[in-house]
Amino acid sequence: MAGKQKRKKKRAHFKTKADEVGELRQDLVTGKWVVVATGRARRPDDFLAERSTPKRFVKVDNKCPFCRLDEFPQLPDVLRLPDDPKEWLVHIFPNKYPAFSAEEEFRTWNLGPYRAMESVGWHEVLATRWHDQVDALLTVREMSLQVEALVLRYRQLRQKPSVNHIQIIKNHGQEAGGSLEHPHHQIFTVPVLPSDVHDLLQGAERYTQANGQEPFGVMLEYEREDGARMVEENEYFTAWCPYASRRPFEVWIMPRRQEPYFENIGPEERELLAEIMRNVFRRIYVGLNDPPYNYYIHSAPCDETGFACDRSQFSHFRWHIEILPRMNVWGGFELGTGLEITTALPEESAEYLRRQKIDEIC
Amino acid sequence: MAGKQKRKKKRAHFKTKADEVGELRQDLVTGKWVVVATGRARRPDDFLAERSTPKRFVKVDNKCPFCRLDEFPQLPDVLRLPDDPKEWLVHIFPNKYPAFSAEEEFRTWNLGPYRAMESVGWHEVLATRWHDQVDALLTVREMSLQVEALVLRYRQLRQKPSVNHIQIIKNHGQEAGGSLEHPHHQIFTVPVLPSDVHDLLQGAERYTQANGQEPFGVMLEYEREDGARMVEENEYFTAWCPYASRRPFEVWIMPRRQEPYFENIGPEERELLAEIMRNVFRRIYVGLNDPPYNYYIHSAPCDETGFACDRSQFSHFRWHIEILPRMNVWGGFELGTGLEITTALPEESAEYLRRQKIDEIC
């Protein structure tokens, strides 16, 4: 990562323009523009001040259904790690209110000029053992177990004929759509290729054809050399605030090895992924006082069904994690245009996250 | 509009499938899929029950800056209707905290592999005269004056060389991103073609090439014949809940005349647009107890700059209004995939909105 000296120099480059009228920045892959509204910009500390509710720590909450999983022996045990009815730390099971029906086959039909299909898919929950195991407070071993469980389940689900794409997400906090306080991921499978994933794959192929290099490698090389938006890195992974960040403190975590599929990571990579995830979540937790956030894993679609786009596009794609702290509410402008307005420079977000002291929390 | 008999028959068609596993529906123009999560479905009345705060009516609030516009003579008077310092009912003026800088020219540059440009544009506010003039409580004349002011300002702004697209929006309620209670629209101009508008134009052209008819006319013809999703119509305009609704109670209002540009509507159309808008907002207000919502006007981009896409695409596009009540929070699934999960069938939303009694409110 570049030192402070270097960052200062680079910062002058964009500040000159930002001071005058602000910037629109274009995402390298999707082609989407974002507005960095410097006229509305706030200092990183201002975001912190807005969230001053002290954190309660509750290991077990008797009213929480995820704290009482052991009381419901009828619950189908999809996956437990360690696989022990008393000692498990991670548990994957079907969502009680699924958005999809778990079916291997599905019908499609037309209604007048419209197309429809049955909404088949698996909608599952990964719950941590304890009520207070938010991402920032996990040990690296606990985080690694979560990643391992997600990879194992991913490999099972992608075999199913009606699964075209798997989306792993976490909603942390009510403002981020979290319905239960107990930390949990959700795993969704869908029979279609979602539009944003399609745009990402297509964008990666378009960039590669135009420039002779795949865009994720280009981005990583530039970010590591430049340093201004870097948050942290280790032997296998890099975490940074993307140039065209859509939100204040948005962080991406990406492997430096070209790999389209999340589920292909091996045990050694998994440990280093767990470490960098835990550290990034700690920086966000300490620096922004445990804000609400969403995170999701972008991985190439499964290839088993006929609904996937051209498979050759996948080779230019690289799986990665996007973390989006939830500091503002989307209005009609964002909903109508897809053009997001962020109120913090990613360079300032990254600098703020870099200097957080994360070894001091328990 | 089709009668109740007809609706019942049609409803059986989709209900058979929805009862079993739910549906994914595809938007005719953008190709985006939405999930109708019938397993999570709620009755229209359930949405109502969640919002029981009684409404205060305050004609003037002394703490509200938009109630005190007349006290600030230094405010540049962009546009007032009627154009009278004492009797005006609608006032357009620059946003105090603009997301863009009002400049006619702008620079673009590269930073490493990335593209950026100065974020130039006009960011203005249209305020109603009185604090309690929410859309549902306007007279048709007041609504018509708002539309007239928007059209007049639109025609001025589109002449500016740095304006490539104009987005008119309204955020109603805090949950919808509204920062002030006083009813107000926002007008944004941007130097780029936003991705969602681009997708819409491209989708319209693709559909026309494949089917020999433009999709908006096809949709209107089918919806009017089918009736199940119709909300209201008059001589010039149709309001309905779209087949691939992204949100419960989403309503689109569209002219039946093929016209890409909102700003081309004439005085007679304007009156009928004001009437149908007022009525639809009344249905939402009465039926859902004044919920938060966003609405925006989709119009073809301005052609004056070099950043527009192929202009021939515009002829297949039709300007329209999209109203999105804000009944749920987006989570990581929607953010990561662009695939939205709605918890109400548009056929049920439409039926509920149709049967609201809107003549009884003052």
Image (cartoon, coloured by chain):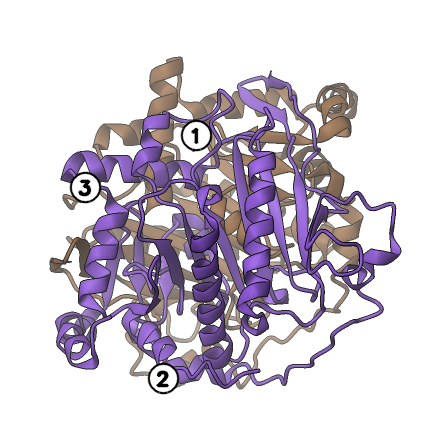
Chain colours: A brown, B purple
Specify whether A198 is left or right of B277. left
Q: Position of residue A145 (x, y in %)?
A: 45, 56
Query: Quick one: B55 or A290, which is closer to the camera?
Result: B55
| Residue ID for mark 3 | B213
Q: Are marks 3 and 2 on the same chain?
A: no
Chain under numbered label 1: A
Q: Secondary structure at mark 3?
A: loop
- Say which quadrant the N terminus of chain A sits in: top right
Q: Quadrant of residue A352?
A: top right
Which mark is nearer the camera, 3 or 1?
Answer: 3
Q: Position of residue B317 (x, y in %)?
A: 33, 40
State yes or no: discs 3 and 1 in contact (Cβ < 8 Å): no
For the residues marked 2 and 1, what is the alpha-carbon distance in whole angstroms?
A: 45 Å
Let me know if residue A239 appears in the view: no
| Residue ID for mark 1 | A29
Which mark is nearer the camera, 3 or 2?
Answer: 3
Mark 3 residue type: Gln
Q: Position of residue B26 (x, y in %)?
A: 25, 53
Chain under numbered label 2: A
Whether residue B2 is situated above or below residue B157 in the rendered picture: below
Please name the residue shown 48% across and 37% down the image: B194
Lower sequence index among marks 2 and 1: 1
| Residue ID for mark 2 | A72
Mark 1 residue type: Val
Which mark is nearer the camera, 2 or 1?
Answer: 1
Please name the residue shown 53% across and 48% down the image: A334
Please name the residue shown 30% across and 61% down the image: B35
Specify whether A281 is left or right of A187. right
Query: Quick one: B22 or B5, which is closer to the camera?
Result: B5
